[in-house]
Amino acid sequence: MNWSAIAFDWNQIRALLATIEEGSFSGAARALGQTQPTLSRQIAALESDLGVTLFERNRRATVPTGAALELVEHVRSMGEAAQRISLTASGQSSAIEGRVTVTATNIMASYYLPPIIKHIRETAPGIRLEIIASNELQDLQKREADIAIRHARPEQPDLIARLVGETTGHLYAHPDYLDRVGRPTCIEDINRLDFIGFEQNERVIEHLNAIGLNLTADNFRISCGSSTVHHALAMQGLGVTPMTRDWIEQHSELEELWPALPPIPVQTWLVTHRELNTSRRIRLVFDAIADGLDQQRRETRNRVTAI
């Protein structure tokens, strides 16, 4: 097939890449923030321009044809180059205005970020902030976010990170729940309790068993990806949930399950792309979040010390 004779529409190429990566028109439309009819029209127009069928359509799946797979190898590098151009252009921006996207966990976005965002709005009103409150990791290299607040240090060489907090995770439950089932006095007692799990319980089980427990999937009768919902469910006496000690001390009546259980180290990292770090607006937001979290940590430590 002679691709060099085709004048590509970049929107059509993005639609092709997204459909192959997501496995369906509906998934690709969600990933690109489009409606499914719009994306379908872009794919149909690309098929018409090329004179080939790119996807076999049926009720159960959207299957790329050989022509689509041949084409995608050529255009994937175009997409990666476009991302690098966008990152470089954003990184060289000198104006303290424009959009900055920050992704953080539900609890971080709900309880820690609001006063920091208020400060940013007061000092840099030209910045438009978009907060993605999710426990899912956003891909900074694909510009899904400009700044991420994570509990694990990133390994990608193109990302830079600053350690902005260290605390410990523990198991908590509502006193009513513990009154009902009995407070544990040994590991075996804990292994019989109900736990509130996350979307990927296998990883949770792995971490908790690493500190001496012997949990299985049967312990997790309720699961949710939101830490704020976890807390709300635990407050109803529905089971045990892992939470960080610093958050529990400020916001909860939950009781630590068994103080003799080893703590789980929890770090908080502020992350951005190396090239975006030269943008004045992203640098301002990055530094404001780092300073704000540090101030909150010091204030919490002083309150605990005073008590």
Image (spheres, rainbow, N blue to C red):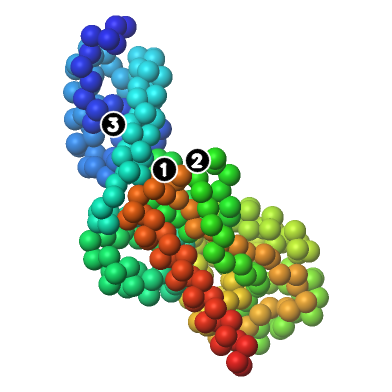
- Density class for disc 2 (Cα within 10 Å; few <14, some 14-19, many ≥20) is few
The amino acid marked with disc number 1 is: Glu
Residue 178, above or below 289:
below
Which mark, by number, is residue 25? none
Q: Which x, y percent locates residue 206?
A: 69, 55
Q: Which residue is mark 3?
A: 15
Say which of marks 3 and 1 sits in front: 1
Query: Residue 43 appears at what percent x and percent y?
Result: 24, 26
Gap in angstroms between the C-alphas marked 1 and 2: 8 Å
- Residue 7: quarter of image: top left
Task: Name the residue at 29% across, 50% down.
Answer: 94
Q: Which class describes the residues within 10 Å of circle 1: few (<14), some (14-19), or many (20+)?
A: some
Numbered badge on residue 275 = 1
Q: Secondary structure at mark 2?
A: loop
Of circles 1 and 2, the one toward us is 1
Q: Position of residue 148 (x, y in %)?
A: 45, 55
Going from the N terminus, do you reach mark 1 or mark 2 first? 2
Q: Secondary structure at mark 1?
A: loop
- Residue found at the very far top of the displayed protein: 2
Give the amino acid at mark 3. Answer: Ala
Residue placed under numbered mark 2 in the picture:
158
Contact? badges 3 and 2 (CB < 8 Å): no
Picture quarter with the C terminus:
bottom right
Give how far apart the Cα atoms at labels 3 and 1 are.
Answer: 26 Å
Neighbour tally class for label 3: few under 14, some 14-19, many 20 plus, Cα within 10 Å: many
- Going by the picture, which residue comes out furthest to the bottom? 307
Does 12 appear above or below 123? above
- Residue plotted at (46% across, 69% down): 291
Q: What amino acid is labelled 2 in the image? A: Asp
Q: Quadrant of the N terminus?
A: top left
Question: Toward the viewer: 167 or 283?
Answer: 283
Asked if disc 1 and disc 2 are in contact, CB closer than 8 Å, the reply is yes
